[in-house]
Image (tube, helix red, strand yellow):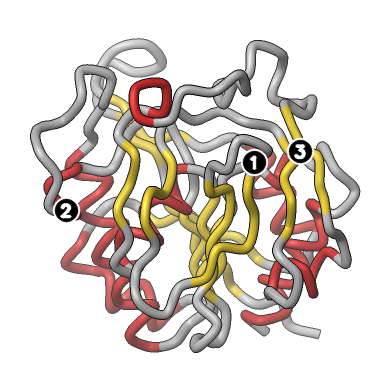
Amino acid sequence: MKRPVIGLTLDAEPAGGWSKLPWYALRQNYFSAVIAAGGLPVALPHAPELAADYLDAIDGLLVTGGAFDVDPALWGDEAPHPKVTLKPGRTDFELAVTRGALERDAPVLGICGGQQLLAVALGATLLQHIPDELPSDIAHEQPNPRTEPGHEVAIAPGTLLARITGRARMAVNSAHHQAVKQIGPGMVVNATAPDGLIEGIEAPGRRFALGVQWHPEYAVDAADPLILRAFVEACA
């Protein structure tokens, strides 16, 4: 059976460190998780003008996370919080390809920062810095390794996420200082942290538009691979 082609967005780094020239980066476990789920992963360099061409070539879009934030101007917020790190080239491309995928009703999975990007593309707003806007005893930037859970989430019954996982709760890793503040039209919250923070979103009117605030590619919970598998099956 032919594997569906899954386009993965890349992070971008300036010159220095690994290379003396600007470079792209993405953890290997994003790719290995897609392969294990039955997909054929391909990387998508940042070229907003090629978004339609990429979408012609892939069956689904996975918007990844990274050490960056979505520009608050995109949802009409005030100036960026001092803790906000912008990568305009990355965001411009991800927004273009995500909006294009949504227009085509192609399957989209957003992970961590990718969930936030997907949410904004669907009309949501974000918390710029969780500790300032929603103080909590939960460490949403967990001090322990990302290969371990940081906290649990409650999964809303009747949602796509609930059908995929068959769970009411999951253990998740947590590596973010921003989160969805208010969902947009046609969106549903599918998971929340114990402090009430939104941990997952979806758009029921679409073929597959799902975002999770954690990183299922690490498989810290037995239900994590089910999320990748359901996404790849939707792409097929």
Describe residue 65's horizontal placement relative to residue 143 as left or right. Answer: left
Out of 152 and 53, give the one closest to the viewer: 152
In three-dimensional space, the C-alpha distance between marks 2 and 3, rounded to whole angstroms, equals 30 Å
Do the CB atoms of the residues marked 2 and 3 lie less than 8 Å apart? Answer: no
Residue 232, how many percent across, how many down?
69, 72
Q: Position of residue 194 (x, y in %)?
A: 68, 38
Residue named by callout 2: 74
Q: Callout 3: helix, strand or loop?
A: strand
Query: Label 1 near label 3: C-beta < 8 Å?
Result: yes
Query: Disc 3 residue type?
Result: Glu
Foreground mark, 1 or 2, reads: 1
Amino acid carrying label 2: it is Leu
Front position in the image: 97 or 133: 133
Residue in front for this viewpoint, 95 or 157:
157
- The residue type indicated by label 1 comes to Ala
Q: Which numbered disc flags the more N-terminal residue, 3 or 1?
A: 3
The residue mark sitting in front, 2 or 3, is 3
Q: Quadrant of the N terminus?
A: bottom right
For disc 1, the marked residue is: 193
| Residue position for label 3 | 152
